[in-house]
Image (cartoon, rainbow, N blue to C red):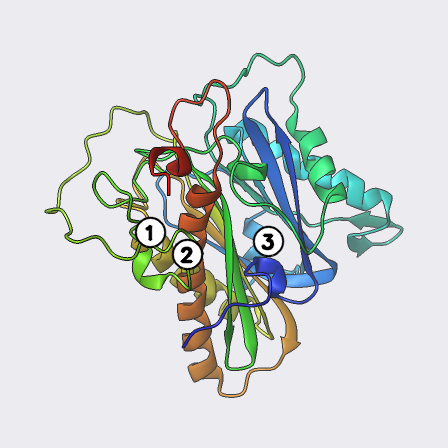
Amino acid sequence: MLKTGPRNLITDVAGLQVGNASDAHVKSGVTVLTSETGFTAAVHVMGGAPGSRETEVLAPDKLVSQVDALVLSGGSALGLSAASGVADAMRATGRGFALGDQNVPIVPSAILFDLWNGGDKTWQENPYAALGAAALDAVDAEFELGSVGAGTGGTTATLKGGLGSASLRVDGFTVGAIVAVNALGSAIVGEGPHFWAAPFEIGDEFGGRGAPPAYPAPSLPDSPVAPGTATTIAIVATDAALDKSQALRMAVTAHDGLARSLVPSHTLLDGDTVFAAATGAVPLGDPVRDQMRLGHAGAICLARAVARGLYAATAAPGDVKPCWADRFPP
């Protein structure tokens, strides 16, 4: 029987912390994952319209072996400024890749499109650098889910999106996921209330509704939205000692969690991006077996995190989509 970590959050991976910052007026926000020391990271993109920063350094053949933080942000390309706010704040504390007498924080990031979600986007000054710095200042092992951080303004085909997280204990390792859900697809089966992720639910972490009595016939989406106007972005993490190549494989496998919880996923109109993070605290025993099980655990965590994000979302003035809790009350 699968068991979660004590918090059922990505921060069950010891040493990791998460901070959120939101702007209710803009209906957007930023989520930062970091630790007191650097960690191994990788990234894999399966959506057709991604937006990112410093992801090239995560390739296995690149010089930098560890990062200082990973950032998930709303705001489309404008939200890439969030990573600058995080990097500036880290540099002020002496954190970063050492180059002579200079420190350069390595802060890869990915963004989602939430510019048409009912928030006021007529700002005179880009708010995302300040939101990034605020999210970094708020990092902790405990954090909220739902309409917070990068999930503040998220939507799906049928409901409001949100920020979700989940964890598992596997063979002495801890695996976790965090996701900002903003998908062209739907997280619920048909008209709901059941989640596509229902087979992977542990306890009643997203309502305990179980599987639907029947599944609808397959259908094809017919969306009028423009490319790049959706995107679900996520991080899977573990305390296993993975190098960049092994972390990349974990990021690739974790995308299965999106396919299990969002229908459709990885479309040309989404920019679905998954980072993997490894703190290196627990050595691999059997590298092949352990990597296979860690990758599958990451996918399970990510599927559950998607449902938990929608389950925890809350209504706000100006919303363009209802939230799950209001549409399907107990």
Q: CA distance from mark 1 to mark 3?
A: 29 Å
Q: Nearer the viewer, residue 21 or 109?
A: 21
Q: Quickly name the residue at label 2.
A: 304
On the rendered structure, is 301 left or right of 120? left
Residue type pointed to by label 2: Arg
- Choose the circle earlier in sequence order: 1 or 3: 3
State the residue position of label 3: 57
Mark 3 Cα-neighbour bin, 10 Å: few <14, some 14–19, many ≥20? many
Q: Nearer the viewer, mark 1 or mark 3?
A: 1
Callouts 2 and 1 close, C-beta under 8 Å: yes
Label 3 near label 1: C-beta < 8 Å?
Answer: no
Q: As drawn, is 302 to the left or to the right of 9?
A: left
Residue type (three-letter) at the residue carrying disc 3: Val
In the image, residue 135 lies at what x, y percent? 69, 40
Q: Visible in this render: residue 65?
A: no
The residue shown at (41%, 52%) is 206
Quadrant where the C terminus sits is top left
Secondary structure category for the residue under label 2: helix
Q: Is residue 154 visible?
A: yes
Query: Measured from the top left, where is residue 165 in percent x and y?
Result: 51, 53
* Whether residue 323 is situated above or below residue 196 in the rendered picture: above
Label ID, residue 261: 1
Q: Considering depth in this image, is 5 or 223 the residue closer to the camera? A: 5
